[in-house]
Image (cartoon, rainbow, N blue to C red):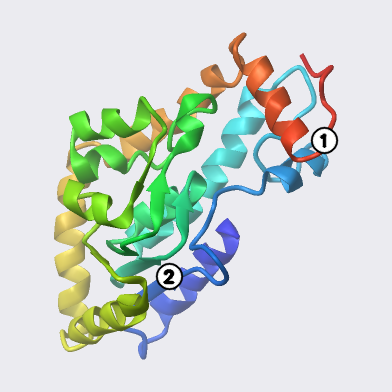
Amino acid sequence: MPGEIQSAVKRANADDDVKVIILGGSGRAFCAGYDLKMSAENKRGEINIGNQKMPWDPLEDFRALDYCTKAFMSLWHSYKPTIAKVHGYGVAGGSDIALCADMVIMAENAKIGYPPARVWGCPTTAMWTFRVGPEKAKRMMLTGDLITGKEAAEMGLVLEAVPEDKLDETVQKLADRIKTVPANQLFFQKQVINQILLQAGTREEAIIGLSKPQADRTGPEMSIAVSFVYCAVGIDRSCMY
C-alpha cells in the first residue's frame, strides 16, 4: 500500500483537473497499521516490516522503513493540498499516513494512536511533535495509548472531529472551499508553511525516527514482544532469539 499511495499522489500532482487530494480508507477503518501476518510470512528481502530471520539486519530494516516513510511523506510533499479522512481506526502505521496529510478530519468515535511505541519503535515520520508539541507527543509516545477523534481535535493533533455520519460531508465541504483558490496559490502557500517546518527539522526528525527502531527491535525485552506478535498472528517463531 505505501507504494500505491505514492503513485496516486504522483498521478494527482500531474493532473491539472485535480485541486485537492482526499485520502480515506475503505471498510471498517482508515488504516490499522502494517499487516503483521503478511510481514511474518513474507520471504527475507521483500519490503515488509518484521520478516527477517535472525540475526537481525538493521540496514535491511532501515531500507524497508525508509521506503514506507518516503511513500507516506509524499502526502506532505505533494504539490497539492492533502486531506486525510479518518474513520474507525488510524493507528500504528495508519497514524503515520494520516498525520502526513496537510489536514486531518476524524470521526468523533474514531481512534488514533501509536501502540507500537510500547515495544516496537517510534513513528518513522515523526509528525506527532510538530502537530502537538513535545509534552503532548511524549504523553502519547510514552504510553502508546489510543485517543478518540474528539480528543485528538481537542489536543490539536487533527483539524476537526465530527459525527461519523457527517464525515464525508465535512471533508468534501473543506475540499470544495479549497478548490476555489488558484492552483499556483495553493502550491506556494503550502510550500511556505512546509519550509518553516523543514527549517525546524522535519526531515532530521524523520531520519531519527527511522534509525531509532534499529535499537528498539534488538533489545532483550523485544524477544518476548516479537514472539508474542508472531504467536498472535499464528506464526511460530519461538526460536528466533
- The residue tagged 2 is 23
Residue 235 — which label? 1
Task: From the top left corner, tell me how far across and down residue 157 is, in percent.
Answer: 24, 49
Whether residue 51 appears in this view of the structure is: no
Residue, x 73% and y 36% (percent of image)? 232
Residue 203 — which label? none
Give the side of residue 176 with respect to residue 15, left or right: left
> In the figure, 92 relative to 142: above or below?
below
Whether residue 176 appears in this view of the structure is: yes
Density class for disc 1 (Cα within 10 Å; few <14, some 14-19, many ≥20) is some
Give the side of residue 58 with respect to residue 25, left or right: right
Residue, x 43% and y 70% (percent of image)? 23
Q: Which quadrant is the C terminus positioned in?
A: top right
Residue 108 or 130: which is nearer the viewer? Answer: 108
Three-letter amino acid code of the residue under disc 2: Leu
Three-letter amino acid code of the residue under disc 1: Ile
> Circle 1 sits in a helix, a strand or a loop, which is it?
loop
- Using the rendered view, name the quadrant where residue 59 is placed: top right
Residue 33 or 15: which is nearer the viewer? Answer: 33
